[in-house]
Image: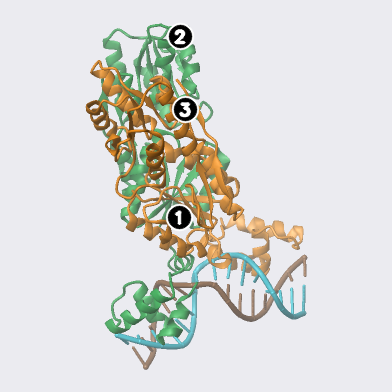
Chain colours: A green, B orange, C brown, D cyan
Amino acid sequence: MATIRDIAKLTGYSITTISRVINHHPYVAKEKRDEILAVMKELDYVPNRSAQNLSTGQTKNIGVLIPFTNHPYYDQLLLGLTKAAFEKGYRVTLLPTNYEAELEKQYLDEFAAKTFDGLIVTTRANTLDKFIPYLHEGRIIFCEESPDVSVGCVYTDLEGAIREMIASLQAKGLNKIGLTLGRSKRLSYNSRLILDLCEELIPDFSKEWIKWDCIHAAEGIEAARYFEKLGVEAVLSNGDEVGATILQHYKKQGKTPPLVIGRDNLLISEVLNFSTVNHHLVECGETAFRLFYEDSKEKIKLPYDLIWR
Amino acid sequence: MATIRDIAKLTGYSITTISRVINHHPYVAKEKRDEILAVMKELDYVPNRSAQNLSTGQTKNIGVLIPFTNHPYYDQLLLGLTKAAFEKGYRVTLLPTNYEAELEKQYLDEFAAKTFDGLIVTTRANTLDKFIPYLHEGRIIFCEESPDVSVGCVYTDLEGAIREMIASLQAKGLNKIGLTLGRSKRLSYNSRLILDLCEELIPDFSKEWIKWDCIHAAEGIEAARYFEKLGVEAVLSNGDEVGATILQHYKKQGKTPPLVIGRDNLLISEVLNFSTVNHHLVECGETAFRLFYEDSKEKIKLPYDLIWR
DNA sequence: TTGTATGCGTTATCAC
DNA sequence: GTGATAACGCATACAA
């Protein structure tokens, strides 16, 4: 592990000059540059990133707060994010919270420790005000609607999609609508939003129509049982996999399933022929990075495509 | 952004003492510790990670070479990896290669720059010998069988699974077996392995039975068309999603599909009722981290579960 | 139990 | 064009 000093010694030039060729600065004679480059290659010299980071105060690294890595919603977001980040020479470090507030706080402190140049918040276990003090530590971008706060954010138009879905169901005469939602403990912004919409739009909406803590496919089974007892006529699921599982559960028993609507536009919705939404999550990830990169405080609502089947 | 020096000044103690409380070292009087802690809290002091990294020569960060983030195979691996890493206080940075050799090399150089304490190779675009020089730069773990090289590796027993599948198909009298495989350019170790097995075990095996470059669900359509023309009796797919798409394509046209076997044990295989394999990828990721953590050169073959349907 | 001095490997500010 | 030298913020022998 040669250092910049070794290269300086061996070539006879100063550390400064070596640093200049590392950083592609002008003002260094071509012959010298070539000579230095040769010696660097010979010694397998690679500038130490930690030293550069300390010296420049940058890491070219951003952290992403996510719950876990095996959910299509976050994976699509991640895909767009890493792609965009990479194009600008940034790396992305995964910060899986599993929805645990304490863990999330540790990550915030790591952010404060300048480990990352930026933080992308795709999920949030703490209340928004816990994030405020960290806003001055660097650039934080939220992937959820964040009114009342001066931060950049990019989010899906869940409200529009839900409104359209409910209107469509009602037009079909379906009024008893089951809901699957995520964690019941600390309501996500999205869950809150959907709840409010249901109460606004559905005449006799009852909180009993909600099946909480549905996240992965497996939880769909219990949801199906629940909805069956309840006798719902339709289900707004919070993900294609959960929706598919519900559908399958009915079918296996030879019962007519409710009208299920998914949310990830996955292959399985096509295969099982149920409606779903394309929320453009890849674009969401790309945009999140752009907001970070441009240090923008824009608030961007992404369009959606309802896919009726 | 207070520094350790600021804390030293304000408390009147030396930098060393501050450093000791940061790192939970013994030999510092409880009252002083408390006093220092209080001042740190008051100033929102957080030790700078880049400085720590440079000073200790560690980053508590590992890089993961993967093709992309939206494939169930890698997502499961990633889940196990991040989980295990976090328990030991390590972070994981995504290094998506998209199978591009040049890009992968950049990551290797970043590894050489001490950006990461370790590198997990779940995919590889370059030949193995390109990795050799980097073996001395830090700990590299491979998630593929790596004989003839002194490195730790953990891999799925694809050979066992394929052998069992083929035997089972042959017992059913199915001999014309189609194959979907990944990138056709630089054969993966797994593709090579499967090819060899097919040539060994299937009497009239022809390379024409292979549909290359099947990675995501979408590529399954063309594969289905290809296999239909070919008239294969069974398909060993390289993933549940590809398998499902193939199956659907036949069904849509009212044709009897070949016997399809998947590889990810996803919900969709259950829903469409086709056989698949559980390769214990989450465990694979966990083990990969353990090998890194223990600086082990073990070579571990993971068991598999064939799920017949 | 505490403090001094040095090193970690760069970048950046000068002056030449 | 080029080169000393001072940061960058922390950890750690070594002393005391």
Write the residue at 24% across / 26% down: B228
Q: Earlier in the sequence, mark 1 or mark 3?
A: 1
Figure check: A227 above or below B109? above
Q: Is residue A198 left or right of residue B148?
A: left
Measured as percent of width and height from the top left, residue B249 is found at 27, 23
Residue placed under numbered mark 2 in the picture: A228
Residue placed under numbered mark 1 in the picture: A116
Residue placed under numbered mark 3 in the picture: A215
The numbered mark 1 sits on a residue in which chain? Answer: A
The answer to whether residue A125 of the structure is visible from this angle is: no
Q: Amino acid at mark 2?
A: Glu
Measured as percent of width and height from the top left, residue B298 is found at 58, 51
The numbered mark 2 sits on a residue in which chain? Answer: A
- Please check whether the numbered discs 1 and 3 fall on a single chain: yes
Q: Secondary structure at mark 2?
A: helix
- Please check whether the numbered discs 2 and 3 fall on a single chain: yes
Q: Amino acid at mark 1?
A: Phe
Query: Real-space Cα distance between discs 2 and 1?
Result: 48 Å
Write the residue at 37% across / 73% down: A22
Write the residue at 48% across / 41% down: B77
